[in-house]
Each structure stands twice: as C-alpha cells, then as structure tokens.
Image (tube, helix red, strand yellow):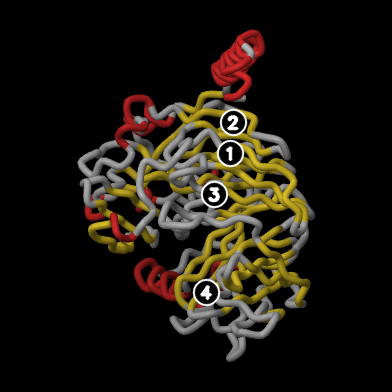
Amino acid sequence: MNIAMRHIAGIALLCSCGLLSCVRKEEADEKDLKIIPIEEAYRHPSSLKASDYFRQIRYVPLETTDSSLVGDNPTVWIAGDRLIVSSRPNRCMAFDKSTGRFLCSIGHIGNDPRGALSLSGWLNAAAGHIYFPAGNGRSVIYDTAGRFVGDHQDREMTDGLYGIDTYDYLNDSLLVTHLPATLNKPDRILVYQGDSLLSVFPSRGETVSPLSGAMADIQRMNARKNEETGYDAIYMTYKDGRQNCLVPSEQIFWHKGEELLFRETFNDTIYRVTTSGLVPVKRLDFGAMRWDRKDRYQPEKDRAIYPLDVYESDRLLWLRFVVNLHHPEEWDVYNAIYDKESAEAKVASFKEGVYDDLHHFLPLQPSFASPSGEFAQLIPASTIVEWFERNGRNEEWPEEIKALEKLTEEDNPVILLAR
C-alpha cells in the first residue's frame, strides 16, 4: 500500500477513507458492547455465595493407586465423561468423571517419535485431543483414552523473550495460536487446520513490542510464586528500568458453547475469535484502574487491574484479577462474578472464595470451566482432612461429603464440579 500511496494519490485517498471508515466502525462497534462494571464492584466488595450462581455442587474423589498418584501443582480439565489431571514431575492421567475411577495414563516423556518434553500440555475438548510439547515447535497428540494420534508442527514461534505463545482451538479441526508482538511483528493470532496455516490477523494488542526480547538487554530475571493463589509470575527487569511480568498459567482464551473468546494481555475488551478476525462482544470496565498502554511496563505502577483468568457460562462470567502486578510481595487477587441475568457484578477477595451456603463446606475456587459451563476445582486431600479436623461433621451434609471423612493426606485430590 505504501507504493500506491506514493504514486497514485486517488487510490491513496480511497485507501485512507476506507481505513478511517474501518476505524470508525470498530469504534462504533465497541461503543455498543455489553459493559461489565468491575471497578465499581471492586470499590464496593461483597461476599460471594454459591447459591447465587450454582444449582448443583458435587465432589469426585480421584482413585488413589500406585499407578494413579497425582503429583505436584496439578491442573484439571473436563473432557466429555473424563477428568484429565496433569501434574509434576510428569504425569497426565484420565479419571472417570462420575466415579473418579482411574482410567489410564496419557503420553510419556522421551526422545522417540511419540515422546514429549513435558506432560503439561493443552486440551482440544472438541476433538478430545491433548497436545504435549516435543521441542522445536513440534507437539505430540494423544486422545483422552491415552492413544497416540499424531503430531503437529507450528508454522511460527516467537523468537526471543517477548511473551508466551498460547494455543487453543476453534473446533475439532481448527487450531488457534496467539503470538506476542516482537520488534518486527505485531501481536497476532494464527488459525491452522492440521499443519496448514489458514489465516493470520492482528489481535488489537501491540503493533510492535516496546521491549527487547534479547537476554543482553535484561538486567535481571526472577520467578515468584504467590503462595495464596498458586500463580507463578516471571519478572524481567530491563536495563532501561522497565519491567515485564509474565504469568505462564493465565488464560487469554476460553470457551462458551461453540464460541472461542479472547482477551489481549492488559486489555479490557473481550472478543469472539473467527477464522478471519476478532469480533468485540464485551468490555470489562476497569474505570480509573485500567492500564494505560504507556504504563504497562513501569514497575512503580500500582492499583491497576490485571486480568488473570476468565471462565464463562451462559449465565456467568467469572473474572480473576490481580492488583499490584509489578509488586509480587503486594499482590491482591480477587474474584469477580458477573450475573448475566441480573446484570450485577460482585467482587470479593480471592482468599474468601465463594461461600458454599448450599452445603456449608469448603469455599469454591474453580480453575477451569468447560464449554458447556461446568466449573471444576481441584482440592488437595490434605485441605479436606484439615477442614474436618477444624469443623467436625455436619449431619446435614449429603452423603458424598460425609464420605470424604475417609480421606487421608496421602490420597489423591478431590474434584469439585459445579453447575
């Protein structure tokens, strides 16, 4: 387009008008978005109660055997009638969603064609496939029954320390990758079918990275774990004084029904992902606590809202966010729940969770939501043992909760499922 602008003034004018029209249309579209008042709810915190958001809560103890022991820092996904649990050092296992019975191990570590570097992968729930990294942009693919399916090779990867490449899916055959901006490429989304690249489009994030991705420009790097929430954060301080914070587990993609939703890091707009671009659908109103682009890498910046995860169902949008991103020792993490039926948003401190006024048991703190809107939380057996030691038994509890008294600290975790 630059050549045309230099040589054909008329075409340049038309292109300029067309671009201006697109910008105005985008601005008009975003003015009509559903606005979710997060800052207002944050300024007036309130308790969150399970009965306001869920009709059913149930508990699934995972079978504990020598071959099914869950390791450290586990994560859980819902895949049809299975619960997939991945944990350190290198375990990925499938359990029956109804009974918790151990079904199979998935994948293995190795240099062979079916081997992975790590069993911390990602799930394509539509296809029932799990992708594990195998090195150099290659992934090995297994189904949730533990069978090897094939492999996948990324067409593009981020070269340098600019951010985290994130993977997800549009349906059972279309894959999506988000790549952060570099010094010569914009923040962008790629859509694949198999190994074929179908489309690439900007994500409304940085047009180019304001930070170098070279180790030589980084003065120091350190990782911090927030003990209260379990979130890891990687801090990179540059020689010019700016600081970048990466949260490896944060979810910028999530699913609601057949829709894939996306939010750009720091940004407050939520988009629906299509094969050709992003369609704005909602905006999280952070008010005065919104991150201005110029402040994003300033370590003295505080009291701004940084989204960590979003979970969504037909009725609820659950946002988890942190205030004081650049000050790990001062992290304040919150849950915000927006009820789409009442158009009401409520915010409470993460440490409170959601009070289980249905059973008067442990607070809810989900870490996953399926496309159908079922929320999942992984509870260590030791946490449940401690709860019973402090609180004793409540005869009004359903039998499935009373049965948890049999757990020992050596048992596998329990999965809470809420709808």
Label located before the other in sequence (1 or 3): 3
Label located before the other in sequence (4 or 2): 4
Residue at the location (58% across, 69% down)?
136
Q: Secondary structure at mark 4?
A: strand
Which of the two marks, 3 or 4, is nearer to us in this view?
Answer: 3
The amino acid type found where label 2 is placed reads Lys
Near mark 2 (Cα within 10 A), the count class, few <14, some 14-19 or many ≥20, is some
Residue 247, percent from left and from top: 41, 55
Q: Secondary structure at mark 2?
A: loop
Q: Secondary structure at mark 1?
A: strand
Q: Secondary structure at mark 3?
A: strand
The residue tagged 3 is 179
Residue 82, percent from left and from top: 71, 67
The residue tagged 1 is 316
Near mark 4 (Cα within 10 A), the count class, few <14, some 14-19 or many ≥20, is some
The residue tagged 4 is 87
Residue 340 image label = 2
Q: Residue furthest front?
A: 7
Residue at the location (77% across, 59% down)?
127
> Label 1, label 3: how many angstroms apart (C-alpha)?
28 Å
Check if mark 1's residue and mark 2's residue have beta carbons within 8 Å: yes
> Label 2, label 3: how many angstroms apart (C-alpha)?
31 Å
The amino acid type found where label 3 is placed reads Leu
